Image (cartoon, rainbow, N blue to C red):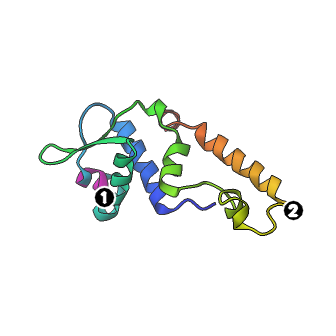
């Protein structure tokens, strides 16, 4: 499993919102400058986060983005799964038996499934609030 820049940037942006807190909408340009992320690339990330209901968006003058829940209600796992689609270490554990002709007799598949479970539990056990506490 390699987390893409989209996943890493989405997580950074969500932490940015969590540290700023409050009801203020933060303009896209401000976020892009503070995080050193291209505004164009950030637009696609914010669209994903907004459509999934992770952030509220207001367009126009005075608009921007903000969290719509407390930092403790967002897990790192939920953010990464949204942007990455899956956190699986190997494709055969997410794409089912059709992904591999040896799925039914693979002696290593249980190990990969166990790793997937460990990764999921690890990331689902960390909230934005936890990350703020560690800063």
- Disc 2 on helix, strand or loop? loop
Q: Is residue 103 above or below residue 21?
A: below
The numbered mark, 1 or 2, whose residue comes first in the sequence reads 1
Which x, y percent locates residue 4? 51, 62
Which x, y percent locates residue 52? 40, 46
Residue that protrudes farthest toward the bottom in the picture: 101
**Occupied quadrant, residue 67:** top left
Q: Is residue 7 magenta?
A: no
**Occupied quadrant, residue 38:** bottom left
> 86 left or right of 82?
right
> 26 left or right of 45?
left
Residue nearest the observer in this picture, 40 or 49? 49
Residue that protrudes farthest toward the left in the picture: 61
Q: Which residues are magenta?
A: 29-33
Q: Residue at x 43, y 55 (%)?
A: 9
Q: Residues within 10 Å of mark 2 (few under 14, many from 20)?
A: few
Q: Residue at x 52, y 36 (%)?
A: 127
Which x, y percent locates residue 66? 30, 39
Pointer 2 residue? 105
Q: Residue at x 64, y 60 (%)?
A: 1
> 77 left or right of 113?
left
Which x, y percent locates residue 36? 35, 59
Q: Is residue 100 above or below residue 132?
A: below
Q: CA distance from mark 1 to mark 2?
A: 44 Å
- Disc 1 on helix, strand or loop? helix
Q: Residues within 10 Å of mark 1 (few under 14, many from 20)?
A: some
Q: Is residue 32 magenta?
A: yes
Q: Main secondary structure of the magenta part?
A: helix
Q: Is residue 98 above or below residue 127?
A: below
Pointer 1 residue? 43
The image's mark for residue 10 is: none
């Amino acid at each position: 499993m390699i987390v893409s820049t989209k996943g890493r940037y989405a997580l950074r942006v969500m932490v940015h919102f969590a540290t700023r807190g409050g009801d203020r909408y933060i303009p896209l340009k401000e976020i892009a400058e503070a995080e050193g992320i291209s505004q164009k690339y950030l637009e696609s990330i914010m669209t994903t986060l907004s459509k999934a209901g992770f952030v509220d968006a207001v367009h126009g003058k005075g608009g921007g983005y903000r969290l719509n829940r407390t930092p403790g209600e967002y897990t790192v796992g939920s953010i990464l799964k949204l942007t990455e689609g899956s956190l699986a270490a190997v494709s055969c554990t997410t794409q089912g038996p059709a992904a591999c002709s040896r799925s039914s007799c693979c002696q290593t598949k249980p190990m990969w499934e166990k790793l997937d479970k460990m990764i999921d539990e690890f990331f689902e056990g960390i909230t934005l609030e936890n990350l703020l506490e560690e800063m």
